[in-house]
Amino acid sequence: MTPRDAARAGLAGLDAGELGTLPSLPECAQWEEYENARQELILGLSLAHSAERCASC
């Protein structure tokens, strides 16, 4: 992708209301799936104790 194509795609994404644009990503739903999974993962990363699966380690 040329820089010009990337810039045009980015501007088109902004015009469409996207907060950020990944010009080569075919479906925005893929990003939304990733973001949802990331948010779920974050919930378990700051617990004050280790996970049960690690209790016997």
Image: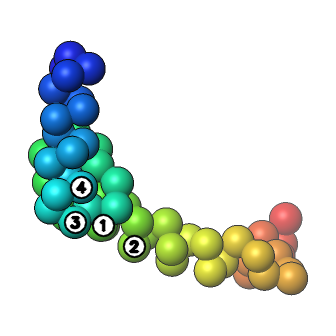
Q: Amino acid at mark 4?
A: Leu
SS under mark 3: loop
The N terminus appears in which quarter of the rendering? Answer: top left
Name the front one of labels 2 and 3. Answer: 3
Q: CA distance from mark 2 to mark 1?
A: 5 Å
Are the residues tagged 2 and 1 within 8 Å (C-beta)?
yes
Q: Which residue is mark 1?
A: 33
Q: Which residue is mark 3?
A: 17
Give neighbour class at mark 4: few <14, some 14-19, many 20+ (Cα, 10 Å).
few
Labelled pair 4, 3 in contact (Cβ < 8 Å): yes
Mark 1 burial class by Cα count in 10 Å: few <14, some 14-19, many 20+: few
Q: Which residue is mark 4?
A: 14
Say whether marks 4 and 1 touch (CB < 8 Å).
no
Residue located beneath label 2 in the image: 36
Q: Quadrant of residue 32?
A: bottom left
| Residue at the (24%, 32%) spot, across then down | 7
Helix or strand or loop: what does disc 1 sit on? Answer: helix
Q: Which numbered circle lies on residue 43?
A: none
Dot 4 or dot 1: first in sequence order is 4
Establish if 23 lies above or below 54.
above
Question: For the residue labelled by badge 4, is the local secondary structure a helix, a strand or a loop?
Answer: helix
Mark toward the viewer: 4 or 1 = 4
Q: Position of residue 39 (x, y in %)?
A: 51, 74
Q: CA distance from mark 2 to mark 4?
A: 21 Å
Residue drawn where x is 16% and y is 26% of the image: 5
What amino acid type should be assigned to the residue bearing mark 1?
Answer: Glu
Residue in the picture at 20% in, 17% down: 2
